Amino acid sequence: MKGYDRLGPELARRLGAGRIRVNEPLAAHTSFGIGGPADLLAEPVTAKELGALLQFSRERSMPHVAIGMGTNLLVRDGGFRGLVIKMTGFRALIVCRPREGGDRLRVGAGVALSAIAERAAELGLTGIEFAGGIPGSLGGAVVMNAGAYGGEIAQVVEECLVVEGDGSSRRLAGPALGFAYRSSAIGEGQIVVEALLRLTPACPEEIRRRMRDYRLQRERSQPLGEKSAGSAFRRPPGQYAGTLIEAAGMKGTRVGDAEVSTQHAGFIINRGRATAADVLALMERVWQAVQERSGVQLEPEIRIIGDDVPP
Ligand SMILES: Cc1cc2nc3c(=O)[nH]c(=O)nc-3n(C[C@H](O)[C@H](O)[C@H](O)COP(=O)(O)OP(=O)(O)OC[C@H]3O[C@@H](n4cnc5c(N)ncnc54)[C@H](O)[C@@H]3O)c2cc1C
């Protein structure tokens, strides 16, 4: 054993063997279906377990990273040296009592955005319809300030509970969340545990109609049946990355099994056996082509973690 995988048995004794995996292929935890192994992967379901994991990492100076549903993530082929904390076990969705404001939902980091949008529609609450077709979790959406169709998570997050690397927890609200286009001030060492969403009562039929419209638009424009991590590049101010990539003649370009989607040039898809190296090489080619054609320097939107080569 070369990495932190040697700590697997000890961590499993502390947390319960069912919650710890050793040398776990991260391809299985990302929508790209790409990525080498994590030395250790843990799936806590309570704040106490999360605290124990962070304490364990700290005592051993072991790097850690939190992930949600892995839908905005490219893991390099060598995998991750340290502990990956998968937060999808934090599944609470609580409708707050009227004295706290009947239009608020307290939602665990692991809840799927589609489930939140569905529950809000049932309750006749508007504000989160835009997220119904985004395939990630609430935690990932807060970190990324996920958005679509004119909406973004920043518009509905009232406050957010994060745990720091030292195990202490903090409530972040307002400017401390630092929301900007597809980003937030939540740093690498911080883990989102839950968020309080503020929604507005509205006509349930209207809410359902909007969700249907958004779903149809998404189905028409995005390669939903393919393995991808959504838009590979951020939208440059006043422009669309997909349009620039198409104008640069890159639609359908391939490196290995990584391909610029012919349906939506903003998406890179894994046609089967793409490696992270293929995706990164293709992103580099796209970047060059767009820079030469339009002078715009694209920036990645997908988050990239891990090492190029195994230990
Ligand atoms: C087909 C498709 C369509 C998409 N459409 C959209 C879209 O319309 N709009 C949009 O904004 N995005 C879109 N995405 C991207 C993605 O779904 C969103 O960014 C989503 O919010 C990511 O959530 P996740 O749980 O998958 O996060 P992950 O991919 O697991 O993680 C993303 C980042 O957040 C961090 N993270 C995740 N959870 C936590 C946590 N609990 N605490 C701290 N850090 C955490 C990770 O370390 C990583 O840096 C799309 C993706 C796909 C595959």
Image: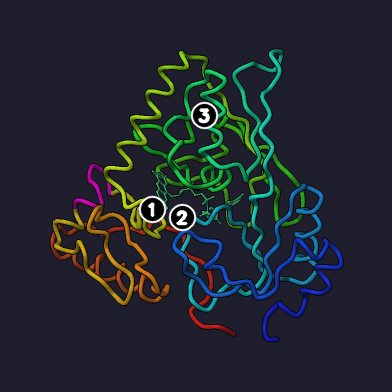
Which label sits on residue 13? none
Residue type, numbered disc 1: Gly
Q: Position of residue 67 (x, y in %)?
A: 59, 56
Number of residues whose C-alpha sits closer than 10 Å to that of mark 3, classed few (under 14), some (14–19) or many (20 or more): some
The CA span between labels 3 and 1 is 22 Å
Q: Is residue 101 above or below residue 30?
A: above
Queried on whether the Cβ of the residue with tag 1 lies below 8 angstroms from ligand 1, the answer reads yes
* Sequence-wise first label, 2 or 1: 2
Q: Which residue is mark 2?
A: 72
Residue type, numbered disc 2: Asn
Badge 3 element: loop
Badge 2 element: loop
Q: Position of residue 300 (x, y in %)?
A: 37, 59
Contact, mark 2 vs mark 1 (Cβ under 8 Å): yes
Q: Which residue is mark 1?
A: 230
Queried on whether the Cβ of the residue with tag 2 lies below 8 angstroms from ligand 1, the answer reads yes
Q: Is residue 237 magenta?
A: yes
In the rendered structure, which segment of residues is drawn in magenta? 236-243
Queried on whether the Cβ of the residue with tag 3 lies below 8 angstroms from ligand 1, the answer reads no
Q: For this rendering, which residue is in front, 286 or 35? A: 35
Q: Which residue is mark 3?
A: 156
